[in-house]
Amino acid sequence: FPNGTNVEFVKVINRGRLRLCEWERGAGATGSSGTGAAAAVCAMVILGLANRESRVEFQAGELEVNWRQDNVIELTGPVQFIMRGEFEYRR
């Protein structure tokens, strides 16, 4: 991957619990990711390895993921402010 890649490493603890490590292009190893948790649960459900409602463990904490029958994904967990910044967009 000459331009880098985003990748999730998933360990199935049991059908309702996953452990996840993530590598994000441009950022490196991250402590957690809601998008990564949602993707991991969906992938493991499709493979028949996890429930649609699962807890995902990260280095920085845990998230509850619920992939509802109407295909909406709900994430529940703690939030923490980590950064403030400004970005100016010019065309």
Image (cartoon, helix red, strand yellow):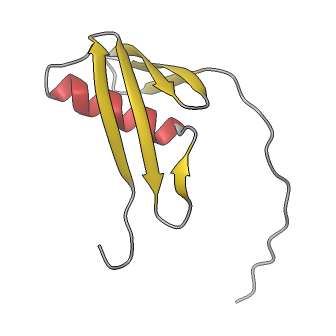
Q: How many marks?
A: 0
Taking the view exactly as shown, the residue that stands out farthest to the left is: 47
19 on left or right of 45 = right
Rendered image quadrant of residue 70: top left
Query: Residue 86 at x, y = what percent?
Result: 85, 67
Query: Residue 30 at x, y = what percent?
Result: 55, 47
Query: Residue 89 at x, y = what percent?
Result: 75, 79
Report the residue at 35% width, 37% height from top. 39
Q: Looking at the rendering, in which quadrant would you find the N terminus?
A: bottom left
Report the residue at 72% width, 29% height from top. 79
10 or 70, nearer to the observer: 10
Rendered image quadrant of residue 59: top right
Report the residue at 85% width, 55% height from top. 84
59 or 41, nearer to the observer: 59
Q: Looking at the rendering, in which quadrant would you find the C terminus?
A: bottom right
Rendered image quadrant of residue 53: top left
Report the residue at 41% width, 32% height from top. 20
1 or 74, nearer to the observer: 1
Taking the view exactly as shown, the residue that stands out farthest to the bottom is: 91
Looking at the picture, does residue 88 appear above or below residue 65?
below
26 on left or right of 52 = right
